[in-house]
Image (cartoon, rainbow, N blue to C red):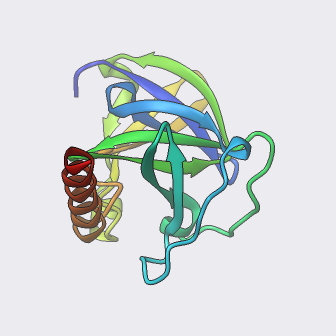
């Protein structure tokens, strides 16, 4: 891995990081009302209207098998560029934006890949902190990504018709 700048966030007391190049924006969760979408995957929390565009919001706690908590005052949506679309992930709090050098990173542990945690890209070490680095390309499953891409294409077709 080459040195990268990451957005650091908390989930259930643990620190995670994601490449800042994949981040489209960070929103205060309390400012948006999430609308439920029937029949979607369990980790899909719903949709929000952001600047006239429908954006899907995923619950990383559900995806990672953590205990769910209510969205609170510090909760944020990290909006990620995912394929053709932009999707948000609910996090407890965004805490930092830092640069990690190569010597501060190590590859994902073998047991993480073996257990199906393909979205773990590596581990970052900053002083006494350990930051789990997520792969923005793999946070969403292939099926979830296909749904987002097809919805994005449909919305583009509809906006060109009007």
The furthest residue to the right? 73
Residue plotted at (51% across, 41% down): 50
Is residue 59 visible to the viewer in this orientation of the structure? no
- Horizontally, is 74 left or right of 25 in the view? right
Question: In which quadrant of the rendered view does residue 56 lie?
Answer: bottom left
Q: Nearer the viewer, residue 95 or 125?
A: 95
Residue plotted at (43% across, 52% down): 54
Is residue 107 visible to the viewer in this orientation of the structure? yes
Residue plotted at (27% across, 66% down): 147
The percent coordinates of residue 22 (x first, y second) are: 33, 33
The percent coordinates of residue 136 (x first, y second) are: 32, 44
Above or below for 137 versus 94: below
Above or below for 11 versus 39: above
Question: In which quadrant of the rendered view does residue 133 lie?
Answer: top left
The furthest residue to the bottom? 39
- Horizontally, is 106 left or right of 78 in the view? left
- Horizontally, is 58 left or right of 95 in the view? left
Q: Nearer the viewer, residue 125 or 159?
A: 159
Q: Nearer the viewer, residue 78 or 12?
A: 78
The percent coordinates of residue 34 (x first, y second) are: 62, 59
Quarter of the N terminus within the rendering: top left
Residue plotted at (49% across, 28% down): 7
- All told, the count of numbered labels is 0
- Horizontally, is 109 left or right of 127 in the view? left
The percent coordinates of residue 43 (x first, y second) are: 49, 70
């Amino acid at each position: 891995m080459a040195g990268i700048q990451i957005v650091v966030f908390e989930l259930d007391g643990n620190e995670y990081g994601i490449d800042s190049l994949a981040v489209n924006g960070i929103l205060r969760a309390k400012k948006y009302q999430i609308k439920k979408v029937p029949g979607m995957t369990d980790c899909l929390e719903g949709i929000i209207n952001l600047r006239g565009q429908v954006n899907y919001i995923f619950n990383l706690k559900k995806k990672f098998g953590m205990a769910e908590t209510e969205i609170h005052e510090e909760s944020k949506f990290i909006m990620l560029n995912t394929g053709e679309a932009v999707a948000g992930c609910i996090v407890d709090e965004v805490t930092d934006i830092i640069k990690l050098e190569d010597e501060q990173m190590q590859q994902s542990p073998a047991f993480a890949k073996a257990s199906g945690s393909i979205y773990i890209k590596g581990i970052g070490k900053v002083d006494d902190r350990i930051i789990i680095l997520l792969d923005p390309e793999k946070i969403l499953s292939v099926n979830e990504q296909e749904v987002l891409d097809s919805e994005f294409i449909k919305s583009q077709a509809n906006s060109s018709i009007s």
